[in-house]
Amino acid sequence: MPENCAVILAAGEGKRMRSSKAKVLQEVLFKPMLDWVIDSVKAAGIENICVVTGHLREQVESHLGPDIAAVVQEKRLGTGHAVMQAADWLRNYAGGNCLVLCGDAPLFSAATIRASGEVHCNNRLSATVITAFTSNPSGYGRIIRDGSGLIREIVEERDADEATRAVGEVNGGAYWFDVDLLLPALSSLKNENSQGEYYLTDVPGFFAKSGRKVGAYVAPFEEISGANDRWQLCRLNDIARLNVIRKHMNAGVSIPFTDGVVIGPDAEISPDAVILPGTEIKGKCRIGEGSVIGPNSLVCDSEIGAGCTFNSSQIYSSALGDGVTVGPFVHIRPGTRLMDGVHVGDFVEIKNSSVGEGTKLPHLSYIGDSDVGSGVNCGCGTVTANYDGKNKSRTSIGDGSFIGCHTCLVAPVSLGENAFTAAGSVVTKDVPDGALAIGRGKLEIKENWTPPKDRG
């Protein structure tokens, strides 16, 4: 059975964005619009994808994965011209069907793509246009149907008369085509219109005039929305933000107030987790059942276990076990793993370190490039000096150790199990199991040192 394929149009310049970044790489909920489209296409079961690039093509092509083909539209001469550039690639899928959609319309769902494809195939249509209804169709091409409900033509707004402009069904910019019919139709496109462009929208009309069936699949209007400028991009973010929040609420996540809550589309959050105001969850994150995130926290590409508390802190590319408490004002940098029951107090920074079960890092400490065992207590102001100006070295702290306040562990250094350090020590040598390390100057008290006039 011939495979389906998809062509994503991503050649637009996007002048109104006023950006050095390609239009399709502008982000919605921290994720490039193009990635939203690609992920929806794949989720709908279509693995054969070709992206048509053009403006800032190097940016776009370097962003694509190795499993996605790319072709170039050197001159932007319309959507039909863009698909023409993929003609050679499309020939690989002769006998199948092709989905064409835009890389700057990120809200198309996999469900809509899948359902519209089923309508297209089950009814053996030559083309199927994804449409939507709106009370304000300004800016969209209008759908003109015949008496049987099939599509007769799509009229671009700039080419429409007054009666056509009053039509409320609009072109969503996404289409299913029979590949064997699309290829010859592309070669017959003309640019006899006000823009001098080759419109892909002329293809369904060409099929209809030839007596072929052109159908429609009506999608929610918000799904067809795209972004040509920063204001429209902001609107897409608003729509997507509330859609994602609603999805998690429906799955049992508690978000008592949505103020400042922004959750990326790839986050996985378990039931009974609580997301408090001012929290951002970016990238591929997983948050366990019953964990409380926020307020005013940032979770990026990280995993947080069940029953954790993460208060007014930030975490990047790291993982927390179950029952971990963090914050406030903690910075967890990439490569960190905190095991079950770890407690991290205020004003602590942890980087590229593993911390064992039940260990406590209460406050005002820096743990970098370290392997900390289970049941360890680090007193206030503990620092692992991991960088000598040239090399970064690791520190190892054994299970059950007690690190006194204001201890500086100068890496590379290793403390055995149940080792102790005296407060204020600078430790530069390995400490064996059960030993006490004291590394501070002798205290000397000089009585009557302060002149009488300076005494209280």
Image (cartoon, rainbow, N blue to C red):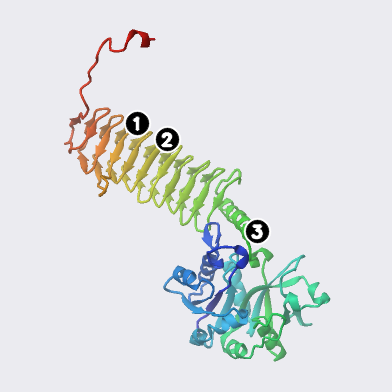
Within 10 Å of the Cα at label 2, are there few (<14), some (14-19), or many (20+) other Cα atoms?
Answer: some
Residue positioned 36% across, 9% down in the render: 453
Q: N-terminal of the two: label 3 or label 1?
A: 3
- In the rendered structure, the answer to whether residue 202 lies left or right of residue 73 reads right
For label 1, the residue is: 380
Question: Which residue is at the far top?
Answer: 452
Circles 3 and 2: CB distance less than 8 Å? Answer: no
Between 380 and 73, the residue placed more toward the observer is 73
What amino acid type should be assigned to the residue bearing mark 3?
A: Trp
Residue 237 coordinates in the image, percent (x, y) = 60, 57
**Quadrant of the image occupied by residue 396:** top left
Give the spatial CA distance, label 3 vs label 2. 38 Å
> In the picture, which quadrant includes the C terminus?
top left
Residue positioned 50% across, 85% down in the render: 93
For label 3, the residue is: 231
Between 107 and 146, the residue placed more toward the observer is 107
What amino acid type should be assigned to the residue bearing mark 2?
A: Asp
Q: Is mark 3 on a helix, strand or loop?
A: helix
Q: N-terminal of the two: label 3 or label 2?
A: 3
Between 135 and 196, the residue placed more toward the observer is 196
- In the rendered structure, the answer to whether residue 187 lies left or right of residue 383 reads right
Label drawn at residue 346? 2
Position of 417 relative to 299 (above/below): above
